[in-house]
């Protein structure tokens, strides 16, 4: 039983190959859109982004490599997995397909069981990747909101009730604290103690010139 459904774009200039792919994929519950040329494939993908593309290589005017490179250059389509299905079976052809941005390569004549298995695998990987990206996005948003809340809490706002004589500050529970203690409890400020010039002259006149 399949883990995920998907919108698949099947591209092949051979009518019979395309018919077999569409029938087999639709029988598995996938939504399939056929395209006979590279230009038609790009137009269909840009109109509605597919979840996966099955792409023939040897097509007139615009071959599969060019189609894949155009897809990967498109911001909205670059993450759509492309599986090449081709009669070209040489290792250099396969490497060229991967270099163009393909995630997998199936040689013709293909076995439909293999095609279905590869499709399911890459749709599952795409689903998991999107799920992880969404979770990371939510986590980043939550962290940003938490940091904003902490910053808000740690920022002193409003009017502080301070004693005109001893300079202590009244807390929310009506208790009075030194300015140093109050600021420490209500902010991220850390104190480094020293002595100013005026106090040094006042309390240690013999040590100050």
Image (cartoon, helix red, strand yellow):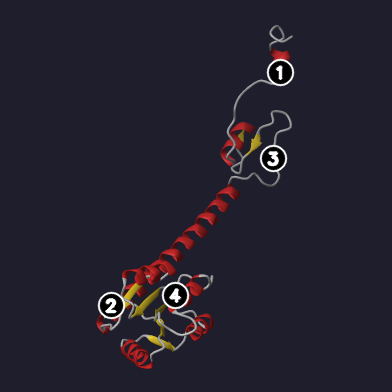
Marks 1 and 2, the one that precedes in the sequence: 2
Q: Which residue bears the numbered disc 4?
A: 65
Instruction: Find numbered disc 2 in the image and state the secondary structure of the residue it sits on.
Output: helix
Q: CA distance from mark 1 to mark 2?
A: 82 Å
Question: How many numbered callouts?
Answer: 4
Q: Which residue bears the numbered disc 1?
A: 199
Q: Which residue bears the numbered disc 2?
A: 117
Q: Is residue 179 left or right of residue 139?
A: right
| Crowd band around label 2 with a 10 angstrom C-alpha radius: few (<14), some (14–19), many (20+) | few
Q: Nearer the viewer, mark 2 or mark 4?
A: 4
Q: Would you place residue 139 above or below residue 19 in this image?
A: above
Q: Is residue 77 visible?
A: no
Q: CA distance from mark 4 to mark 1?
A: 79 Å
Q: Which residue bears the numbered disc 3?
A: 161
Marks 3 and 2, the one that precedes in the sequence: 2
Q: Would you place residue 26 above or below residue 42 in this image?
A: below
Q: Is residue 58 visible?
A: yes
Residue at 56%, 38% (x, y): give it.
185
Q: Is residue 104 left or right of residue 209?
A: left
Instruction: Find numbered disc 4 in the image and state the secondary structure of the residue it sits on.
Output: helix
The answer to whether the residue labelled 3 contacts the one labelled 2, judged by CB atoms less than 8 Å apart, is: no
Q: CA distance from mark 2 to mark 4?
A: 23 Å
Instruction: Find numbered disc 1 in the image and state the secondary structure of the residue it sits on.
Output: helix
Give the camera-side residue of 36 and 207.
Answer: 36
The answer to whether the residue labelled 3 contacts the one labelled 1, judged by CB atoms less than 8 Å apart, is: no
Q: CA distance from mark 3 to mark 4?
A: 73 Å
Q: Would you place residue 133 above or below residue 143 in this image?
A: below
Q: CA distance from mark 3 to mark 2?
A: 72 Å
The answer to whether the residue labelled 1 contacts the one labelled 2, judged by CB atoms less than 8 Å apart, is: no
Marks 2 and 4, the one that precedes in the sequence: 4
Q: Nearer the viewer, mark 3 or mark 1?
A: 1
């Amino acid at each position: 039983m399949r883990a995920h459904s998907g919108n698949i774009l099947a591209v092949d200039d051979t009518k019979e190959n395309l018919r077999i792919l569409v029938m087999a994929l639709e029988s598995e519950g996938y939504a399939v859109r056929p395209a006979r040329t590279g230009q038609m494939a790009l137009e269909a993908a840009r109109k509605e982004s597919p979840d996966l593309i099955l792409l023939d290589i040897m097509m007139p005017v615009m071959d599969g490599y060019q189609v894949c490179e155009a897809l990967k250059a498109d911001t909205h389509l670059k993450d759509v997995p492309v599986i090449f299905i081709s009669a070209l079976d040489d290792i250099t052809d396969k490497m060229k397909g991967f270099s163009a941005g393909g995630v997998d390569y199936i040689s013709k004549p293909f076995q439909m069981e293999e095609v279905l298995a590869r499709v399911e695998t890459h749709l599952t990987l795409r689903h998991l990747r999107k799920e992880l990206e969404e979770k990371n996005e939510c986590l980043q948003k939550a962290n940003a909101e938490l940091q904003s809340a902490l910053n808000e809490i740690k920022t002193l706002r409003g009017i502080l009730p301070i004693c005109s004589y001893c300079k202590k500050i009244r807390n929310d529970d009506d208790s009075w604290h030194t300015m140093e203690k109050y600021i420490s409890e209500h902010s991220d400020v850390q104190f480094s103690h020293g002595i100013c010039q005026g106090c040094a002259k006042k309390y240690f006149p013999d040590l100050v010139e």
